[in-house]
Image (cartoon, helix red, strand yellow):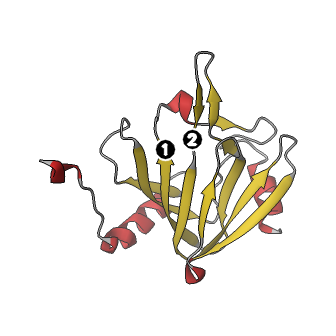
Amino acid sequence: MWWDNISSIDLKILPNLIKEAKKSDRKRIMYCLHNSVDSMLHTMVNVIYKDSYICPHKHLVDDGCQVIKKWESYLILDWKGKLLFFDDNWIIEKVIDIDANKWSMVLVPEGVWHSIISISEYIVIFENKTWPWEEWKDKVFHDKFPLEGEDWVNKVLGEWYSI
């Protein structure tokens, strides 16, 4: 029946997600509400701790046969963070403060370099992203920034926190 495709989340699971994110190597966790990678809309709840690094990326991928254009939206559910937007030369062009007390919501257009950081102990974010999802088609990482685990990640995070 059609109602078999309805997904819901009881936000009472947040304390468990917060604990799991803190224990994870990446200091973040994602809970998916969509049923599969083939879903037309990917809906997630993310918990991101302050020292978690998400390499600046964009959702405009040209695989040689087609161009995948994806939009993404965020609604902050708990605490505070920042969305950072970059140009091709790693210059920060815009910073949007996101705050659960202000019901912050942001729509990120296709092809825009961006990253997110928590400025509180952690943040909880509701995220939507358009289909398709295949790891090699989902995003392109900015080549002027370190990838996760590289030595100079902490230097970059330090600069972002001072903004």
Distance from the alpha carbon under mark 2 to that under mark 1: 6 Å
Q: Give percent across and percent down for residue 37.
A: 38, 37
Task: Find residue 7 and report its image quarter.
Answer: bottom left
Q: Is residue 123 above or below residue 114?
A: below
In the picture as drawn, the residue positioned furthest to the left comes out as: 1
From where the camera sits, is residue 149 visible?
no
SS at badge 1: strand
Q: Is residue 57 above or below residue 122?
A: above
Q: Give percent across and percent down for residue 19.
A: 42, 67
**Residue at the image position 65 percent from the left and 58 percent from the top:** 116
* Residue ID for mark 2: 70
- The quadrant of the picture occupied by the C terminus is bottom right
Q: Are marks 2 and 1 in contact (CB under 8 Å)?
A: yes
From where the camera sits, is residue 18 visible?
yes
In the picture as drawn, the residue positioned furthest to the front comes out as: 2
Foreground of the two, 7 or 136: 7
**Residue at the image position 58 percent from the left and 16 percent from the top:** 65
**Residue at the image position 57 percent from the left and 41 percent from the top:** 70
In terms of sequence position, does the residue under pointer 2 or pointer 1 come before the other?
A: 2
Q: Is residue 144 above or below residue 62?
A: below
In the picture as drawn, the residue positioned furthest to the top comes out as: 65
Which amino acid does the dot numbered 2 rest on? Lys
Task: Find residue 93 and report its image quarter.
Answer: bottom right
Q: Give percent across and percent down for residue 49.
A: 57, 64
**Residue at the image position 62 percent from the left and 40 percent from the top:** 59
Q: Is residue 1 left or right of residue 52?
A: left
Foreground of the two, 152 or 68: 68
Label 1: how many residues lie within 10 Å, few (<14), some (14-19) or many (20+)?
some
* Residue ID for mark 1: 130
Label 2: how many residues lie within 10 Å, few (<14), some (14-19) or many (20+)?
many
SS at badge 2: loop
